[in-house]
Image: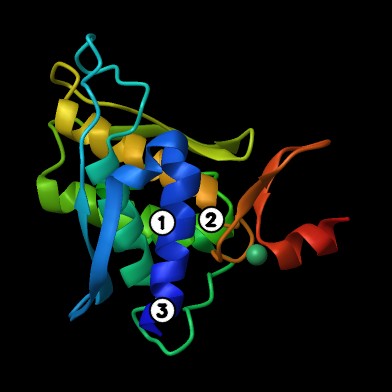
Amino acid sequence: MSRVILGEFAHIVRRALEEDHGLVRPTGVQATAGGPRVVFEAGEIPLSPKPGFEHKPRPALVAEAAARYLATRWAEGPLPRPVPLDSFVALDDAFPHVFEGGTETPAGWHFLMWAGAEWLVETGLPKGFETAQAKEKFGSLRWYWHCDTERDGRTAGVIRAVEAVSAGICEVCGGPGTLRKGGWARTLCDEHAVRRG
Ligand SMILES: [Zn+2]
């Protein structure tokens, strides 16, 4: 199973970081209470001169988002957990302070949203945090949010990384996905790309 998880990790990191993906080096998979977690080393890229508005996701945060996603997806191995069709309801019920107002994300990103929400709660939600909208746009996740305080860099980095990771996850089933253009751009695994045709 570790080999499959490491393969999915490499796929996701490559899609999420594009030319910077070589900065992330997985070193193994560790069993944890929250599922099998990829362990990695990650280099850094120069910080954006405009604090709080980084357009490039941080490699270390992207790697962590991918590792958290895969731990959640494979928590009940040896097969990945199927995504629930009532993803919206399940996310809102489990994380009312994160998703109050709801999400419009496709079911395939359920465990990504789940892992992202868990991560945000763990690091501490900034005062007045609210998801304004979370949806798929041009095949990737867009997660719009606000909070009472001045834009919180830590929260912004986490959410940016979760958005980036969506570029490698099939929005139907949660498997390794690739952006498919033509008509409505969507991120799909090979199987769902065929069915779409
Ligand atoms: Zn799929």
Relative image position of residue 182 (x, y in whole percent)? 82, 37
User: Would you place residue 129 above or below residue 187 in this image?
Assistant: above
What residue do we see at 21% from left, 41% from top? Answer: 43
User: Which residue is painted at 37% across and 85% down in the image?
Assistant: 76
Query: In the structure shown, which secondary structural element does the residue marked by tag 3 occupy?
Result: helix
At a point 21% along the width and 35% down the height, the residue shown is 44
Q: Nearer the viewer, mark 2 or mark 3?
A: 3
Q: Which mark is residue 192?
A: none
* Cα distance in 3D space between marks 1 and 3: 20 Å
Which is more N-terminal, label 3 or label 2? 3
- Compared to 26, does 54 lie above or below? above
Quadrant location of the N terminus in the rendered image = bottom left
The residue indicated by pointer 3 is 3
- The residue labelled by disc 1 is 112
The circle drawn on residue 169 is 2
Q: Quadrant of residue 28?
A: bottom left
**x, y (%) of residue 102?**
45, 44
Q: Do the CB atoms of the residues marked 1 and 3 lie less than 8 Å apart? A: no
Q: Amino acid at mark 1?
A: Leu
